[in-house]
Every structure is written in C-alpha cells, then in structure tokens.
Amino acid sequence: MDFCESINKLPNKEENTLHGKSILKTWNMTDEDIAAVANGAAILKEMRENNISPKMFESGIAVSMFCENDIDMKFAFASGADLLGLTIIDIDKKLKNNTINETAAVASYMADAIGVCENKFIEKSSRYIKRISDAVKDKKEKGVIAQKPCVLNLGSDEDSPVQTIADLQYMAEHFGGIENLKGKKIAVTWAYSPDGTRPLAVPQGIVSLMTRFGTNLVLAAPEGVELMPETYERAEKNAAASGGTFTRTESMEEAITDADVVIPMNWAPFSFLEKRTELSAANLGSYIDLLEHELRENNKNFIDWEITEEMMEKTKDGKALLMHDIPVDITDISCIRGEMTAQVYNANVDSLLAEAGFRPYVIAAMIILTRSEDARAAFSAIAERATRRYF
C-alpha cells in the first residue's frame, strides 16, 4: 500500500507542535493538532487492515491509570499502546495526593505513555490528571527521568479527547472528509438512563470540538440538565469563528429533525456533580447516596427522552448517522427503559461498534505525535519497513 499522500499531510519536525506535550483537552489543541491526530489514526487503521505492523517501540511501557470502571476505554488504551509495541502496566486506583509526584516519577522511568481516566468530581478530576502531567514534566526537567512520557486524558470531568477525536474521524470518513462536515446538522441530545449519574466529559467534548468545523450543532436537554457554563460560551465562539451555528433546545424532536448525525447520551446535571463533589470533600457519603437517589427519581420525569424508530425517521431522509460512546442503555435489553429502543440499537449496532473501533488508533496516533519530534518521518519509517503483522 502507498501511504505517501496521507503521511505527507502529517506534521514534520518544524510543524509538530504536539511533540513533548500531554493531551488533556481538545480546546488546548490547534486545528492542525486535531487534524494530525485524526489523520494519523486513519493511517494506522489502514495499516492494520492491510496487515502492516505499526510497531514503533522495541521496548517501553504504557501505564494505564483508571480510577473509574471504564472497561471500553481501558481496552482502547491497551490496544492502542500494544499496536505500537508497548507493554501495558495497570494501576487501578487513584493516587493519594502525597504520592502523586513519587508514583508519577517511578511509573515514568521506562514509560512512553501514561493514560489517566478520572471523571467523577467537578474540577478535581482535571486537576488530578494535570498534576500527573506536571509531575512528569518536572522530573524530566530535573533529570530524574531520562525522557518524558506523554500523559493522555482518557476521560475527565471536563473532556474526553480520545472519544471526541475518534468521533470526529468517524464522521469524517462517513461524509468523505473533515471539510465535508461544514453545514451538517449534528444533534447532541440527552437521553434517559436508569443510572443517570454519568459524567459530562463526552457531551462537553463533542460540543466543544464539533463546533470548530462549521457544523450546525443543536444541543437538546430537559430543563435543568445543564453542562458547565463555559461549554456554551466555547461552543458559541467556535461556531461563530467556523461559520457554523450552535443552538440549544429542550426538545429532542426539534434537535433531531433533519439532522445528519444523532448522538444520544445520558449525563448528570452540572449542578448535581458540583454538589456531589462538595459532599465528597466533606466525607458525607450517605448524603451522596441520597442525592443520587433524588436525581434518578427526577430523571423519571424525562423517561420519554428515548431514540425510537419514529424519532430516527424525522432525521434527514430518515438516514442520519447514529453515534454513541458505548456501552448503550438499551430498552428491554440492558434495562427496562433506556437511551434507545432495541430496534434502533439492532439496526445500528455494527456502526456503533465501528465508531468505537477508532479509539485505539487515536490513542496510538497521539502517542506517536507526542513522542516523535518528526511525526511525518516516524510514519514514513513504519510504512517503508512494511513489516507484516502476521504471515
């Protein structure tokens, strides 16, 4: 396979602004950074599909730090790191405040990547991931570690860069390129879930990222089910700058009517997450249980916020691209009432799984771009070597 044309779009030594950095929020990345990750992921995916090994490292580890039980993202990180030849080391607990610097240094001796998932507490989760990134940077500058591994945000209280860039690339492939997303109507809508306490990272990340590419994004949620206030401000600025639009509604039907893309998902209100963080800081666990019970009971008022076949028929030509950051709460399969009906899920399950399949490649692309000074040369070397993955 000839990858030259695609690889030539990647940043060279003078252009690669991701080198040596951590990836914590997409809004701290340039459009060129986003495009480089998306393009790199597409190249790696094509290599794998053509039996070419993208192995970049002869040795090294990737440290997986998951404070939350996100099995799907954990598999994605392990798959993406293994794709490049790294050995996975799991740390399945949150580091104590007084041990973050020490553990980050120890974990970094032979590491090329550290993936962190911590999404439970407003403001604290992002600060926790940044503290690990800052600790690694500090130890490299002081000569304690020989090289600085990249720190990847695999899901925080604010953003989920891997998920949202994977979604961007999936849409780009569906519509024939990122440039073809301009003018497309994307409906991001809250949907009912019996759990009801999911973090804000994915909806906020999608709203913040997709508005940068000229889309007409509509955000639908019941009254009181809000995101962080700065998310709306960011989306409005992005839409104005890119020639798109950003609107909000309290009607799922209004959002998905004539939509090109429909993204239903459940998330907890920002006010609830703020309160839960306060109660946790005060060690009031029983009050947290009560708060979560009240939220679930209140969510039952919006049990009809569900994607049905009738709803999907209202989309553009009745053929909108349905997306979701799986796993999905499916009515009559995983729960009594959920985010979408079994009929809708069964009709779109292969597409939803294909969407999730982009995450390992995005992670691998992030690692290459942050660890390689000249990303174009790194990808070229892999392509020229053309080692078969199996025989």
Image: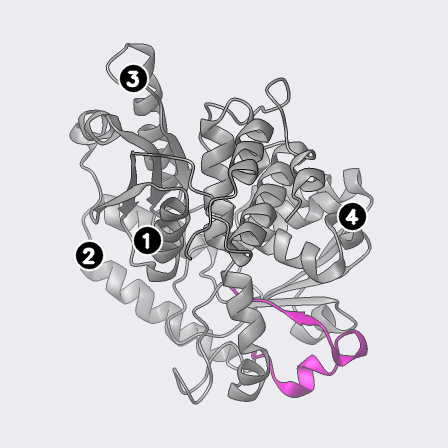
Q: Earlier in the sequence, mark 4 or mark 2?
A: 4
State which mark lies toward you, 3 or 1.
3
Q: Earlier in the sequence, mark 3 or mark 4?
A: 3
Mark 3–mark 1 contact, CB under 8 Å? no
Magenta region, residue range: 305-324
Mark 2–mark 3 contact, CB under 8 Å? no
Residue 17 in which image quadrant: top right
Q: Is residue 323 magenta?
A: yes
Residue 16 appears in the rendering: yes
Identity of the residue drawn at 62% across and 39% down: 34
In the image, which disc is placed on residue 387? none
* Residue density around tag 1, few if under 14, some if 14–19, many if 20 or more, within 10 Å: many
- Judge by depth and name the residue closer to the eye, 69 or 267: 69
Identity of the residue drawn at 68% across and 57% down: 173
Residue marked by disc 2? 285
Inspect the image, locate mark 2, and give the three-letter code of the amino acid beneath it. Answer: Gly
Residue marked by disc 4? 179
State which mark lies toward you, 3 or 4.
3
Residue 314 in which image quadrant: bottom right
Identity of the residue drawn at 51% across and 69% down: 353
Q: Earlier in the sequence, mark 3 or mark 1?
A: 3
Cα–Cα gap, marks 4 and 1:
40 Å
Cα–Cα gap, marks 3 and 1:
40 Å
Q: SS at mark 4?
A: helix
Q: Earlier in the sequence, mark 2 or mark 1?
A: 1
Q: Earlier in the sequence, mark 4 or mark 1?
A: 4
Inspect the image, locate mark 4, and give the three-letter code of the amino acid beneath it. Answer: Glu
In the image, which disc is placed on residue 146? 3
Cα–Cα gap, marks 4 and 2:
48 Å
